[in-house]
Image (spheres, rainbow, N blue to C red):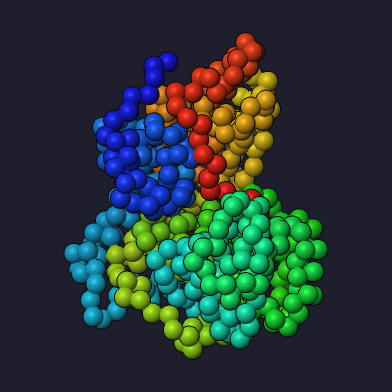
Amino acid sequence: MSRITTGKGQELYRKAKKVIPGGTQLLSKRPEIFLPDLWPAYYSKAKGCKIWDMDGREYIDVSYMGIGANVLGYANEQVDTAAKEAIDKGGMCTLNAPEEVYLAQKLIGLHPWAGGVRYAKCGGEAMALAARIARAHTKKDIILFCGYHGWHDWYLSANLSNKNALNDQHIAGLEPLGVPSGLAGTTLPFHYNRIDEFNALMEKHKGKVAAVVMEPIRNDYPADGFLEKIRKAATEAGVVLIFDEITAGFRLCAGGSHKVLGVEPDMAVFAKGLTNGYPLSAVIGRKEVMEAAQGTFISSTFYTERIAFAATLKSVELYEEHKVWEKQDEYGKMVQRGWKEKAGKHGLEIAIGGIRPLGHFSIIGSENGLVYKTFFVQEMLKRGYIASNAFYTSYAHSKEIVEGYLECVDEVFGRIAEIGNRGEWVEDHLQGKVCHSGFGRLN
């Protein structure tokens, strides 16, 4: 198959690295973690699950769908129409947008245990807001957590007292540069499904814990009553239980994944899974907990803009109307089953993880796993796919698209097997450099 032709996107990224530290605003969009020097990097248009690069080349997105933000697909006409109508009526005003009340009522209707809602513009910011409210409510400082919850000081401070605290929670080697040293010891990690670690921390810091922060589900389902045990311990100790639903929310049902798992938190945070690509996040919580937001200072002009509220209301409406979670699950099941079948067909060892709507895989062999990932991305790009070693399903995908994708997976896995069977190295068949390791949620 022909080599990848570079163009305007790759050239613009070279310019970006001269004026934007790190090259991009989001680690998960850095070209180096996909295909260094060859990744298209920028888009001119996106619609459904298709992307056009700056040279007009068309691709099907079978990777992250806006890093998980476009559950309904790109440029959904009904959602975008609601946003355009809000723009026409005035996106910002001295008075408040009524949509923020309507959305709060909707979120509480989906989660009857909740009694209050506050908003921010992105997930990490909303997690910082939730941590502040929990500390204000309990008047305590320590937060126990597992998993990834953003870039803000409260979270990154975990690496102040133990430089390796986040290594197997998020990314190894994160330096807490710029985080006040006085925050050391205020944020402490435990691992998913390790109730012994959690109990040990609760006992050691008895009477000092403000909150427990965790994704109710990520790569694995809770085992042996894990969530129920944490819920019970938090209740008995007067600790606020916060579920980070930024990614898992609106993947398994209309609302938080905890509705399917059967455990209610004291607070829950929503963002990318909620809005279909518009900048809005929401913190919902029990009324007595959320009342603490009045006693601490949380206020920002653009928390009140109208456009994202209008788009999000329509997004939630469509999510419920079409039962989008059913399609996410259906396509995710097809993808994960397909990965396994194609790998087995060609004698490749593969590890598959993640809930069905958020699946990922890694090939295990004699070379670095990043080599296999880079080759897979490279060969799928040649075949017209924006792909990675993950597939976030959306309502814009279809059975036919998934089947076409898996046919190409079959070809690429076959190529990997052929190269190995000839005694050659896959790395020698890369057109460029090996991709970098990047964003990860390991729990």
Residue drawn at the location 76% of the way across and 59% of the way down: 194
Place of residue 123 in the rendered image (x, y in percent of width and height, measured from the top left): 47, 63
353 and 207: which one is in front?
A: 207
Classify 109 as above or below 261: below
Q: What quarter of the picture does the N terminus occupy?
A: top left
Place of residue 261 in the rendered image (x, y in percent of width and height, measured from the top left): 66, 60
Along the horizontal axis of the image, is 377 left or right of 44? right
259 and 345: which one is in front?
A: 345
**Residue 228 in view:** no
Could you say which quadrant of the image residue 213 lies in? bottom right
Along the horizontal axis of the image, is 248 left or right of 79? right
Q: What quarter of the picture does the C terminus occupy?
A: bottom right
Classify 331 as above or below 88: above
Place of residue 313 in the rendered image (x, y in percent of width and height, measured from the top left): 38, 64
Extreme residue toward the bottom, this view: 295
Residue drawn at the location 56% of the way across and 29% of the way down: 371
**Residue 237 in view:** yes
Residue drawn at the location 71% of the way across and 58% of the way down: 191
Classify 25 as above or below 50: below
Residue drawn at the location 53% of the way across and 45% of the way down: 438
Extreme residue toward the left, this view: 88
Along the horizontal axis of the image, is 323 left or right of 164? left
Classify 42 as above or below 196: above
